[in-house]
Amino acid sequence: MAEEPGPASRFGPGSTYLRPELRNLKIIGVEEHTTFPALMKDIPKDQHGVQVFSSLMSHVGDAYPHGRLNERGAQRLKDMDEGGIALQILSFPGPVNSTHLAATDPAGAVKLAQDINNSLKEAVEAHPTRYKAMCELPMHSPADAVTELHRCITELGFVGAMFSGSVASDGTFLDAPHFAPLLSAFEDLDVPLYLHPGVPPKPVWDTYYSFPDKPQLSATFSLAGWGWHNDTAIHVLRLALSGTLDRHPRLKIVIGHQGEMMPMMMQRMDTLFDPKDFGFSRTVGEMLRAHVWIAISGLFSVAPTQASIATWGVERVLFAVDYPFIDAQRVPDYLKALGDVVAPEDLRKICQGNAERLYKFKI
């Protein structure tokens, strides 16, 4: 009589489950967005940044965010549970932000930032074990931004701030001298500044990204499809090349989307921006690794993550879903695949430990 075949062997780690050392992993998402539409009603709808971002949000590919972006209750918590996310650091997705009101109502723009932060505080208070928050700042007025940053960190308990693109999408970046007191405030408070993509300035948009009579294609190309990642990389490089990072040696910056295309360019930048030629005290790579952390931000592909780890170091890589622009339910499969090529202790750093150290909390 033929012998009965034995049962199939158990599947190994990686493609089907996380390694046993990670069974109590608590994943922290550091770039997770929410909005408050009632607060934004006074921002002029005819502004360049508003129009372009509205075109992107109308894209059929962005179906998942609808009904989730403005929600901070049962649906969001359900999505977090399904994705294995223990805690979100909430932020206001700033391609359209308080600075876009400043042209018509500067004082109103300051109040708008305060109202956004008060609303974020209410969201955290409703679910304090699941949420923390980064603040919105009125960047058109650096003095008011300093005041609001102090309020949010010392009174509201926020863990940092987020700024998107340039001020009101006009091309003003933080290497401008009048932002020095604000950058010093980040150093004094020892909290990170998250530089999020924004809408490229209109002259750049018109020249590089515009396809006549194709507003949705133009918006996608200029924003999430390519352009705003390039825009953020330029912002960070301006801080390095201008000497701003040297003048603010304790400044901590976070950028998303696996380093906004910079990991693959690190060797090129170190070669062409030779410190001897430009009077730098450090290479560009040394500047970036000393000041900048990079978040995964929904780019759930293993190869770019390996490049991020290889160029920045595993201690500088953070986890983020970029919720709700990316589905939380995609997290488990990505982490299982990443677990095949990243040691358990390093995966724990990426998903939990690095964020706890940078933002100074434990879950």
Image: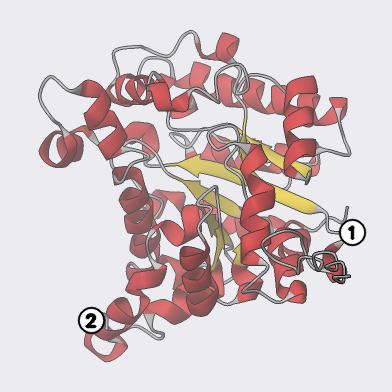
Tally of numbered discs: 2
- Front-most of 91 and 110? 91
Q: Amino acid at mark 1?
A: Asn
- Frontmost of labels 2 and 1 is 1
CA gap between label 2 and label 1 equals 45 Å
Q: Is residue 356 left or right of residue 114?
A: right
- Front-most of 351 and 282? 351
Circle 1 Cα neighbour tier, 10 Å, few/some/many (<14 / 14–19 / ≥20): few
Residue corresponding to mark 1 = 24
Q: Please tell me which residue is depicted at 37% across the width and 76% down the height of the picture.
A: 266
Q: Check the picture and name the quadrant holding the N terminus.
A: bottom right
Residue corresponding to mark 2 = 272
**In the figure, residue 10 lies in which quadrant?**
bottom right
- Front-most of 84 and 228? 84
What number is the disc on residue 168? none
Q: Please tell me which residue is depicted at 68% across the width and 20% down the height of the picture.
A: 71
Q: Earlier in the sequence, mark 2 or mark 1?
A: 1
Secondary element at image label 1: loop
Q: Decide: is 8 above or below 112.
A: below
Q: Is residue 102 visible?
A: no
Residue 334: x %, y % from top left: 61, 55
Residue 292: x %, y % from top left: 53, 66
Q: Is residue 231 left or right of residue 247?
A: left
Q: Is residue 125 visible?
A: yes
Q: Please tell me which residue is depicted at 73% across the width and 47% down the height of the picture.
A: 159
Residue 324: x %, y % from top left: 59, 32
Q: Decide: is 45 above or below 350.
A: above
Residue 140: x %, y % from top left: 43, 34
